Amino acid sequence: MKKAAIFLANGFEEVEALTAVDLLRRGGVEVEMISIQNWRVTGRSGIAVEADTLFTGKEEADCYLLPGGMPGTKFLQEQQTLGALLQEKVAQGKIIGAICAAPIVLGYLGLLEGKPACCYPGMEEGLTGAKVSKAPVCVAENIITSRGVGTAIPFALTVLAALQGEEVAKEVAESIVAQWPGIERP
């Protein structure tokens, strides 16, 4: 079974994180919610979530996801061990996904150089080296970025397709009455 790790920090965007968790699980992916802070993590809208586990820096998965939201994104960016893990996993060809403000973490780590990427409007400066796009979702090799809460479903379905194939993603989209795709590929 494919596995995804989603990293949470206080101030994360609940819709972005939990949409990915829900749709990936519907598509047969094991998803682990990993807090970089405490067992109980509170989102930007005050919704508390209990993490499945705490961050160790040794997480093994097929996919690593970063939801946006503030100050959650800043906490993710400041976590140096997480940055090192993401750099290692990108080099190994693992899928890395970031939505809303979180693609700036990938820009900060130098992972977007020359690749199409998108983020929350007004944060494009943080996409260091990227070919900035306004597409709802961008796929560049093994990196998937997206723009915000309104793109959480296409983002999650695109990640699901990368893990389980487009047919599974289409089945999940159909089951939740969502239109998909709508992504930009180089």
Image (cartoon, rainbow, N blue to C red):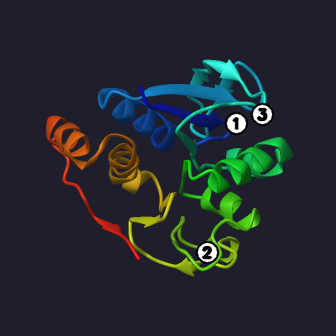
Residue at 57% in and 34% down: 61
Please give the residue where the numbered disc 1 appears in the rendered image. 9
Q: Earlier in the sequence, mark 2 or mark 3?
A: 3
Instruction: Measure the C-alpha gap from mark 2 to mark 1.
Output: 22 Å
Look at label 3 and name its amino acid.
Gly
Question: 155 left or right of 58?
Answer: left
Comes first in the chain, label 1 or label 3: 1
Q: Where is mark 2, residue-wise?
A: 124
Which residue is drawn at the image coordinates 75% and 31% (left, top)? 58
Q: What is the three-letter code of the residue carrying label 2?
A: Glu
Q: Earlier in the sequence, mark 2 or mark 1?
A: 1
For mark 2, give the secondary structure: helix
Q: Of the residues shown, which amino acid type is indicated by label 1?
A: Ala
For the N terminus, the quadrant is top left
Residue 19 screen position, x and y as percent? 40, 38
Q: Position of residue 116 (x, y in %)?
A: 50, 75
Are dots 2 and 3 in contact, CB under 8 Å? no
- Above or below 184: residue 155: above
Disc 1, SS: loop
What is the number of the mark on residue 57? 3
In the rendered image, the vertical position of residue 134 relative to residue 67, given as above or below = below
Q: Quadrant of residue 183?
A: bottom left
Q: Check the image and report above or below for 129 versus 74.
A: below
For the image shown, how many numbered marks are present on the structure? 3
